[in-house]
Image: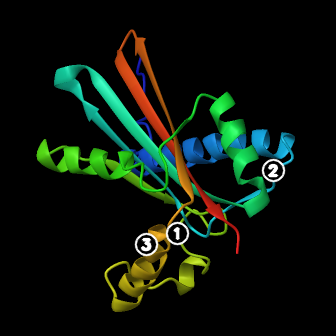
Amino acid sequence: MNRTFSQPEPRNLSLLRLEEADRRVGRRLAVVRGRLDAAGVASGLAEGSAIAAEIALPEANLKRRAIRANLTVAADDLDAARSTLKRLGYRDLGPNGGVATVELLKEAGRTRRSAVHVVFDDELTPGGTSLPAADRPHPGSPEAMLDRRRRLARYRMAPATVMTRLRSRETWIGRREETVEIGLLIES
């Protein structure tokens, strides 16, 4: 009897990790924005301002992830937004707080680990641009570098305050830590 086994389709594991990180950011933002909305606080994702980073440290049996997003709220809603996020377990770090994503990427560099780093923008397509795939510039081209610089400049917005939540849990495959930082920007 002759059996034929088919090979599984090759998969791009880096792309799969990036897509999962993108979905995770979307889920965390949906929960926060849903709770703010239920509290009567209108919020919006500040243009292109959500990022996520993740690193695995097998020697410590640890996986760390950090998510950062800036949400716009009306000046009159700032206190209500703070209170709502505090009820969800967030701490108020003030306007200069919150660097979990940057620290995680620095840790990846120090330990020579690769970190998944995703820029999330609910107005962009999954490829990172609003242009159709055929019209996108090559990632190494000067046009693509200018576009990245323009989008990353948006992250330099100064929030009125940064709220953070750290969750840690033990699983059968090791400890998982997640830091979510929400910068609250006054809508202009």
Image quadrant assignment for residue 69:
bottom right
Q: Which residue is mark 1?
A: 128
- What amino acid is at disc 3? Leu
Q: Is residue 187 left or right of residue 184?
A: right
**Where does the image place residue 106, in percent across and percent down from the top left?**
22, 50
Q: Which of the two discs, 1 and 2, labels the residue nearer the N terminus?
A: 2
Whichever of labels 2 and 3 marks the residue nearer the N terminus, that label is 2
Q: Residues within 10 Å of mark 1 (few under 14, many from 20)?
A: some
Colouring chosen for the image of the structure: rainbow
Closer to the eye: label 3 or 1: 3
Distance from Cα at disc 1 to Cα at disc 2: 29 Å
Can residue 133 be seen in this snapshot?
yes
SS class, disc 2: loop
- In front of the other: 71 or 60: 71
Where's residue 124, x and y in %? 62, 69
Residue visible at 66% across and 43% down?
A: 82
Distance CA(mark 2)–CA(mark 3): 27 Å
Q: Disc 2 marks which residue?
A: 41
Q: Are marks 3 and 1 in contact (CB under 8 Å)?
A: no
Viewed as shown, does residue 68 lie left or right of 111?
Answer: right
Q: Secondary structure at mark 3?
A: helix
Q: Say what amino acid the circle numbered 2 marks.
A: Val
Residue at mark 3: 152
